[in-house]
Image (cartoon, coloured by chain):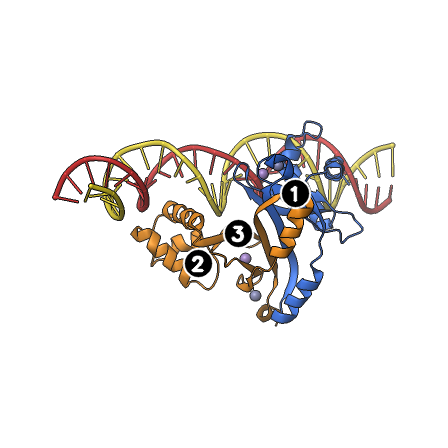
Chain colours: A orange, B blue, C yellow, D red
DNA sequence: GGAAAATTTGCGAATGACTTGCAAATTTGT
DNA sequence: ACAAATTTGCAAGTCATTCGCAAATTTTCC
């Protein structure tokens, strides 16, 4: 595992919030080329060490957000995103396996992935 | 309501599947400029006549898909997308209000929108 | 209906996230 | 340490989407 790879994985693991490639590329403590950051995030996601989702917010546009995913596997999370302060709230590990299976049975398709997230205004920003 | 607006709304209403701005712009029977299509889709969504979501598929990249939404209001749908044939299956109207409310109570945030969709291989493409 | 005001359209250029080709640098296998 | 395989940085490219602006359409008001 290369230096860049390790550093990017550590940054992911350390971050409480999902981050974009751009955020990591601009992080002074990392200072790797954006192409390197993008390529390594892809790599880490393939490996199952990261998970990502695409989110659009009017202020920051459309970007893919990454978060750390334990090597142990199944810890798939979903998030709430505040459109004011742009922070994420971790809704915890996904609890929809049952519903997914029901749908797979009903429609006879095979689900390989699912996307779920919420947007709105967080408690702090309402006040 | 302008000619373009009406035509784009009709195209949406007529389509069984969610469509992208590009698909509509390239539809020969419409032949409006892409900027016009994009602007009117925004407009229709603000009005509540359309709903959209952003979906990434390896073959077609990241695009926003639009579908018709009855003026009567709450008919919010979710979809399954086949990564082989790129067709969508309508999973029916959203049934997560209860869960949403539970989250709002738990975290004291206000949900303004939610995104949920599945990707995988459809019945026909498995065969 | 017709003229002026308000909105929308088409066109071309810009934007911004993300990708890619390629030569140099790093990492890996022995 | 040496050669082979992989990764990196840089610069240029891609592609959905947006934007400025002048011309065309739609709306407002008489
Ligand atoms: Mn945001
Ligand atoms: Mn597709
Ligand atoms: Zn907030
Ligand atoms: Zn299919």
Residue A72: image tag: 2
Of residues A49 and B27, which is closer to you in this image?
A: A49
Whether residue A95 can be seen here? yes
Residues tagged 1 and 2 counted as in contact (Cβ below 8 A): no
Which of the two discs, 1 and 3, labels the residue nearer the N terminus?
3
For ligand 4, the image quadrant comes to top right
**How dense is the environment of label 2, judged by Cα within 10 Å: few (below 14), some, or many (20 and up)?**
few
Which of the two discs, 1 and 2, labels the residue nearer the N terminus?
2
Residue drawn at (65%, 70%) of the image: B105
Can you identify the residue that label 1 sits on?
A108
Q: Chain of mark 2?
A: A
- In the displayed structure, B46 sits above or below B83; it is below
Where residue A96 appears, as percent x and y from the top left, is 61, 57
The outermost residue toward the bottom is A127
Name the image quarter holding the C terminus of chain B: top right
Say which quarter of the image contains residue A72.
Answer: bottom left
Residue drawn at (44%, 50%) of the image: A45
Of residues B2 and A85, which is closer to you in this image?
A: A85
Of residues D30 and B72, which is closer to you in this image?
A: B72
Q: CA distance from mark 3 to mark 2?
A: 20 Å
Residue drawn at (64%, 38%) of the image: B123
Name the image quarter holding the N terminus of chain B: top right
Determine whether the residue tagged by mark 3 lies in a helix, strand or loop: strand
Determine whether the residue tagged by mark 1 lies in a helix, strand or loop: loop
Q: Nearer the viewer, mark 3 or mark 2?
A: 2
């Amino acid at each position: 595992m290369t230096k860049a790879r390790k550093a990017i994985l550590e940054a992911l693991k350390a971050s409480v919030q999902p981050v974009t490639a751009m955020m990591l590329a601009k992080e002074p403590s990392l200072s790797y080329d954006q192409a390197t950051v993008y390529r390594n995030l892809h790599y880490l996601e393939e490996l199952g060490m990261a998970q990502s989702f695409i989110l659009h917010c009017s202020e920051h546009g459309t970007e893919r957000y990454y978060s750390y995913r334990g090597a142990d596997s199944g810890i798939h999370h979903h998030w709430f995103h505040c459109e004011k302060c742009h922070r994420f709230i971790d809704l915890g590990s996904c609890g929809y396996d049952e519903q997914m299976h029901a749908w797979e049975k009903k429609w006879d398709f095979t689900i390989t992935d699912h996307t779920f997230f919420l947007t709105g205004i967080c408690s702090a920003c309402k006040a």
